[in-house]
Image: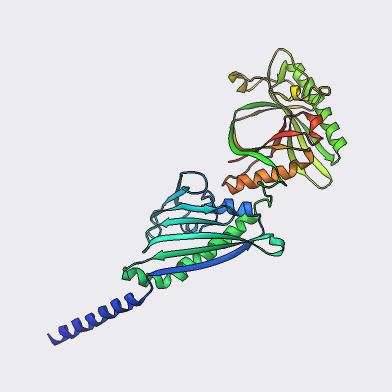
Amino acid sequence: MTRIIEFLIALGIVAGLFVLIGVCLPGERHITESIETNRKMTIVYDTVNSLRRFKDWNPLALRDKAVELKFSGPDAGKGARMDFSSKDSTLGQGSWEITDSEKNKRVVIAINDETRGKDKVTTFTLEPTGKNDRNVKITQDYSVNYGFDLFGRYAGLYVSRHVGDDLKLGLSRMANMLASVPNVDYAAAEAPLTDLKIVELPAENLLVVNAGNIDRNNDAIQKSIDDNMEWIKRAMDANGLVAAGPVRIVTTDFGAEKYAFDVALPVRKGSAAPAAAGDKKDGEADKAAAPAPVAAADAGELSVKIPAGNPVTYSHVAPHRAASASYTGHMAGLDLARNGLRAWATTMGNEVVDRPYESWKGGVAKAFTTDGSYDIYWAVK
């Protein structure tokens, strides 16, 4: 009996100490980690202001590669939400939701998960830094409130190790991820892209010529396009085809001295083939570039026979998704514009595939002036 009483007294002392120490422990925890990147502020802000690339940087996705992520609300900004569900008991279910954001300055995210505590919030603060403010300092704060949950307060003793390590790892992975994005500010004057969006492109029929490696000389490039358009026109005439859109240039490699590309033209069946874009006389470029009406049946694969000696090939392109933007200016600025489109698409959580191309809406001649106009496309998964 005495031993039982002694045991109960000892147990009471331990419980009392547990409560006393627990009451003295902080009811809130706050930790901060930082990292720097040389990516443009626009890229960094758009990355943290959206949850679409969450799996590419957050350690949660490393713990369970089969974790299910469900997105809702807007693509970015306040209200953008991601719910996660994992069979791993250490993760369980939860959500991240952007509750506030200030352009190029900060993003606040509310976290709901199965760990102890409430009012869990992580905030990304962005600050220009480095020489001439070329870099961006990313600071991630995390705070949690345990209230009078004594077990939670004890759990808070380890938050700097568990959550803090996650913050360090997450920021490191984010910096590596950002390094793979073309460092082009697609929202700035240096890359004047408009109407950035993801589009669903229908099936198409194309006549294509590989132009090869052309000297990066405006006259050489324009002559190559014009010559290859003549080959395409001959193939159209031989098959009773007409243009179904403006000429497009598909880029293979834009090097320091050489430019490798294909010349392509969307086509459809027709009674007679009009002069192709770039073959019109002065003042007729816009008319040449205007796409002809396309009937639903035109999306089907055509039977095309290419005359002997003609370098043109026929291609039927299946429907697909693509990142798209419009650009106005000299064709020499298209490489920067393409990289700007890729940077935007990647930042928005899309993986670009295949080669990019531009529809030269103003015709070939006008493309070699500051009045050129284009729609740029890059297929995404």
Q: Examine the rendering and report whether any part of residue 134 can be seen.
A: yes
Outermost residue toward the left?
1
Q: Please determine whether, in this image, residue 161 is positioned above or below residue 44.
A: below
Q: Quadrant of residue 131?
A: bottom right
Residue at 46%, 70% (x, y): give it. 160
Q: Position of residue 177 (x, y in %)?
A: 60, 55
Q: Please determine whether, in this image, residue 202 is positioned above or below residue 76.
A: above
Residue at 81%, 35% (x, y): give it. 369
Outermost residue toward the bottom?
2
Q: Please determine whether, in this image, residue 211 is positioned above or below residue 116.
A: above
Q: Examine the rendering and report whether any part of residue 310 can be seen.
A: no
Count of all numbered marks drawn on residues in the image: 0
Q: Quadrant of the N terminus?
A: bottom left
Q: Quadrant of residue 263?
A: top right
Colouring chosen for the image of the structure: rainbow
Front in this rendered view, residue 99 or 334: 99
Q: Quadrant of the C terminus?
A: top right
Q: Position of residue 229 (x, y in %)?
A: 79, 26
Q: Position of residue 89 (x, y in %)?
A: 37, 58
Outermost residue toward the front?
102
Q: Position of residue 99 (x, y in %)?
A: 46, 52
